[in-house]
Image (tube, rainbow, N blue to C red):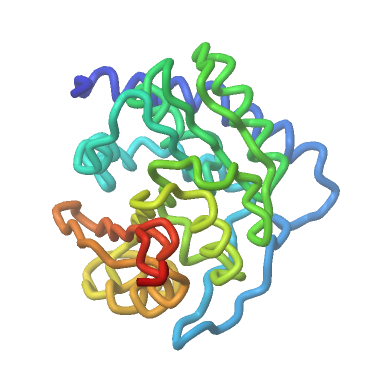
């Protein structure tokens, strides 16, 4: 487990690379306000939050995030193995991607996707600065994840799923990318806790997540509830019938 000093180094290094990139992108943007990536709408009884613009990327590398979210403890709980193939969807500037790359090691691979080209540019710059070779940045859409089919051991979205404006298409794409038995992990702020200081549309309850994810062909496995403000919702792609022999004639 990395030391607190190492964790702070990661945040500082990301900040030193990403914040100038944000400023440069902002300077070349002619709009007066940060562009909207999507309009808000309702889905299955909740409001889908507006996607954060790349101009707010400094929020992703705020120093307080270490204490608020405990990213290393969160990843420890998932027991990611060297050699695993994983995806970080909505990777932003690579805050979680960098940690995943270290855990899967040189024999593993991390697909880091985002829907904003500016985020992908910053992520690439950050990975280059750290000398990371096992990350594949992908400019994706929610209708097309760009992920390889049936190759992934784990897909993670950290504070991302609640912003997806086409959840069904995204979940179907993720399911196709996961191996049978592969895990989908949603890290979301707890809607069940009114003391979590986040706007309601940026929270997700366990019940709401299950209502949305399970109909898309996932099995709910467990919820881990040890983080201060977030919970870790773990789903699994079951094996298809033809993969288990369940649809073979007697």
The residue lying toward the viewer, choosing from 155 and 238, is 238
In the picture, measured across the screen, residue 132 lies left or right of residue 199, that is right
The residue lying toward the viewer, choosing from 45 and 104, is 104
Does residue 160 lie above or below 69 as drawn? below
Residue at horizontal 59%, vertical 29%?
136
Residue at horizontal 19%, vertical 52%?
227
Image quarter where the N terminus lies is: top left
Q: Quadrant of residue 166?
A: bottom right
Residue furthest front in the image:
250
Q: Position of residue 126 (x, y in %)?
A: 56, 23
The residue lying toward the viewer, choosing from 99 and 212, is 212
Image quarter where the C terminus lies is: bottom left
Residue at horizontal 58%, vertical 47%?
56
Residue furthest top in the image:
131
Q: Position of residue 202 (x, y in %)?
A: 43, 67
Q: Quadrant of residue 212?
A: bottom left
């Amino acid at each position: 487990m990395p030391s607190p000093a190492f964790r702070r180094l990661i945040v500082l290094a990301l900040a030193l690379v990403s914040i100038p990139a944000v400023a440069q992108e902002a300077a070349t943007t002619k709009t007066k306000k940060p562009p909207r990536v999507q309009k808000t709408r309702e889905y299955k009884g909740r409001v889908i939050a507006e996607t954060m613009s790349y101009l707010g990327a400094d929020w992703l590398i705020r120093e307080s995030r270490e204490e608020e979210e405990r990213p290393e403890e969160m990843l420890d709980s998932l027991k990611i193995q060297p050699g695993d193939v994983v995806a970080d969807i909505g990777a932003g500037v690579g805050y979680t991607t960098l940690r995943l790359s270290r855990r899967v090691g040189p024999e593993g691979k991390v697909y880091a996707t985002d829907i904003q080209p500016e985020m992908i540019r910053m992520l690439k710059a950050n990975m280059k600065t750290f000398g990371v070779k096992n990350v594949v940045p992908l400019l994706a859409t929610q209708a097309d994840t760009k992920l390889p089919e049936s190759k992934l051991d784990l897909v993670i979205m950290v504070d991302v799923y609640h912003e997806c404006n086409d959840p069904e298409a995204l979940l179907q794409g993720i399911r196709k990318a996961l191996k049978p038995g592969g895990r989908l992990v949603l890290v979301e702020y707890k809607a069940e806790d009114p003391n979590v200081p986040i706007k309601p549309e940026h929270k997700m309850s366990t019940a709401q997540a299950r209502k949305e994810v399970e109909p898309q062909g996932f099995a709910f496995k467990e919820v881990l509830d040890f983080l201060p403000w977030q919970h870790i919702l773990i789903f699994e792609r079951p094996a298809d019938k033809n993969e288990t022999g369940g649809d073979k004639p007697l």
